[in-house]
Amino acid sequence: MTWLTAERWRLLVPAVSLTVLLIAVFWLQPRTMSYTGLNLLFNLAVPIALATIAQMLIMMVNGLDLSMGTFVSFVACVTATFLQTDPLVGALILFGCIAIYGALGVVIYLRNLPAIVVTLGMSFVWGGLAVLLLPTPGGAAPEWIRWVMTSKPPFVPMAIVASVIIAAAAHWLVMRSSFGVVLRGVGGNERTVERAGWSVLRARATAYAMAGFFAVLSGMSLVGLTTSADANIALRYTLLSIAGVILGGGEFVGGRVSPIGAVIGALTLTLAASFLSFLRISPDWQIGAQGAILIIVLALRLVLTRREARVAH
Amino acid sequence: MNKSLIVSALALTLLSGTALAETADKRIALSNNYAGNSWRQAMLQSWDTVTKPAVEAGIVAAADAFTTAENQATEQAAQIQNLILQGYDAIVLNAASPTALNGAVKEACDAGIIVVSFDGIVTEPCAWRIAVDFKGMGKSEIEYLKDALPDGGKLLEIRGLAGVFVDDEISAGIHEGVAENPQFEIVGSVHGDWAQDVAQKAVAGILPSLPQDIVGVVTQGGDGYGAAQAFAAAGRPTPIIIMGNREDELAWWKEQKDASGYETMSVSIAPGVSTLAFWVAQQILDGKDVPKDLIVPFLRIDQDTLEANLETTPSGGVANVEYSQEDAIKVIEGE
C-alpha cells in the first residue's frame, strides 16, 4: 500500500463519492450519458470550481473568505459591462480587484485581524459596488468569453476539459511548485516558515492575490454561461465554495488542502443538486437532502482520516 | 375562472380533436424560482388544478412543477439544464432574473425546447414572454376614478417597494392617467411596500400634512386595507380606496358596502397566470403561430363581482383566476 500516501487518501473519499453520484445520475437519467448531457450537467460547476479554488487558497493560509459570493457577483457585473464595452477599462478594474485582494492579505497579516471579519465587511463593499454598476439586471457577455464557455472540443465536453485544467493548474501551483510549499507552510506553522527565512507577509499577500485571480476567473466564466449579469447572481458561491473545499478533503486550519479534491468537491455539489432534482424530491426537502449528502460524505471522511493517520504512522 | 369553464374548455378541445393528436405525447415543465408567499403558493396551486385534468384528458403527457430550493439565478439555471436533460418538450418559466438565465434558456432553445416565460420574464429572444401590463394597471385606476368622481379632486398615492421595476411601472401608469385627466391632482405619495402594516404606518404619518378633501387613494395592491385603517384612526371620512384583490381588502370592502353602500374597485395580477403560460406553451407545441410577446390581462373586481370573488378567495390569500385553453387562444389572437 505504498502508493496510498496521505495525499491520496485525502482524495479517495471525494473521488469515490463523485463516482457513486455520477453512476446514480446515469442510471436515473440515461440522457446525461452523452457529450451534451455531461456538458449540461457540469458546465455551471466550472465557475463554482474556480470559486472553490479561490476559497481554498484563502483557507490554506488559515483564512475564510465570506465575500466570495458578492465578489464573484461584482466581477460578473464588471465583465458584463466594462469588459464588454471597454475591454481596457474592464481589465484594469479586474486587475485592481486582484490587487485589492493582495492588499487585504497584507492588512489581515499586519493588523492581525481575523480574515472572517475583514471579508465579511468587504462583502458589503462588493455587493454595494455591484448594485451601483448594475442596478437592474443586464449587460452582455464579451463575445470571446461566450465563445470559450460554449466551445465544443472534440470527444470531451468543455465542462470536463475546463475542470481538468483548473485542477491541474491549481495542483501544480499549490502542491508541486516550491512557493506552494511555503504557502501551505504558512497555514501549517507560520513561525517555522518565518524562521526559515521566508517572508510570511509576501506569502499571505500572494495567497490572497491568487485567490482574487481565481475568483475573477469564476465571475468571468459565469457570465460566459449566463450571457449577462445580475448584482446577486453568485451569492450562493460563498457557502458553496466553502462546502466544496471541505468536501474535497480540505480543512479549515493547518494548510491542509487539496486542489484536485476541491474541484471534485465543486463537481459533487453540482451533481448532488441534479441528482435530487432527477429523483423528483420536493423542493421543501431538497436543501435538507443536500445537507444529508454532505454529512454522509463528511462522516465517511472522518472514518477514513482515522485510517489515514494509521497509514501515515 | 371556475371548474365549469375548465370542463367546457376540455370538452372543446376533445371535440376539436386536432389539439389532442398534436400534443398528446408532449411533456411540459414549470420552472419556478420561489414559493415563499401567498401569491406564489396560489400560482402553484392553480398550475395543479388546471394541468392535472389536462394530463388526464390526454391533452399533454405531463405537466410537472419544479421549484428551486433557493431563490437564486444560478440555481434556476442549473434547474433548467436538468429539465433539458429530462427531455421536456416545453419549459414554462417564472424567472429569478430577467437576464441571468439567458444562457440556460438558449441551451434549451438549441435543444429544440419551447420556453415560455411569464411574470418574471427573460430577455433571451428565443423565448416567449407573457408580460404584465403594470402601466396599464396603474392607468386603469385613474380611469375608474374619472367615472366615479367626475369633478376630480385630490389623490393620495401609495407606492410599492422602492427600486423595484413593478413599482416604477404602476406609478408611471397612474401619473400618466393623472396627466391626461387634469381634474385630478396627486397631493401626497408614500411607500407602502405592498404590505398592509407598512402602508398603514406610512399613510398615518402623512395624513396630518394633507388637506381634508382627499377624494381617492390610488394603490398598488396589498396596501388598501392598511390605508383604510389609517383614515379611520385619524377620524377622517373614507375616500375611494382602490383595492388590490387581497382577501383582507375584499372583506373590508364588503363590510363597508353592506354598511354604507361604499363603492370602489380592485385590481391586481392573478396568480393563475401560470395556467395561461401553460396553455400558451401547449398551443406553441400544437404548431400554432404565437407572437413572442404577449400581454396578460389583469384581474379586476367591481362592485357587482365583489361577493363572488370574495367567496372563492381563501382567507389570507389573493383573488385568483385560472385560464382555459380558450382564454389562451384569445390572448394569443390579441382579443
Image (spheres, coloured by chain):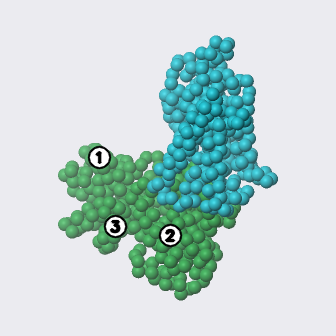
Chain colours: A cyan, B green
Would residue B335 be seen by someone viewing this image from the given angle? Answer: no
Pinpoint the chain carrying mark 3. B
| Residue B313, numbered circle | 3
Mark 2 Cα-neighbour bin, 10 Å: few <14, some 14–19, many ≥20: many
Q: Which residue lies at the image location 54% right of the left edge and 35% below the top edge?
A: A67
Please identify the quadrant where the N terminus of chain A is shown.
top right
Secondary element type, mark 2: helix
The numbered dot on residue A55 is none
| Labels 3 and 2: the sequence-earlier one | 2
Q: Which corner quadrant of the image does residue B216 belong to?
A: bottom left
The residue lying at 29 percent from left, 53 percent from top is: B226
Q: Which mark is on residue B276?
A: 2
Which residue type carries mark 1?
Answer: Lys
Whole-number angstrom distance, CA of label 3 to CA of label 1: 26 Å
Q: Earlier in the sequence, mark 3 or mark 1?
A: 1
Viewer-proximal residue, A105 or A197?
Answer: A197
- CA gap between label 3 and label 2 equals 19 Å
Element class at badge 1: helix
* Residue B24 percent coordinates (x, y): 59, 77
| Chain letter for the residue marked with disc 1 in the picture | B
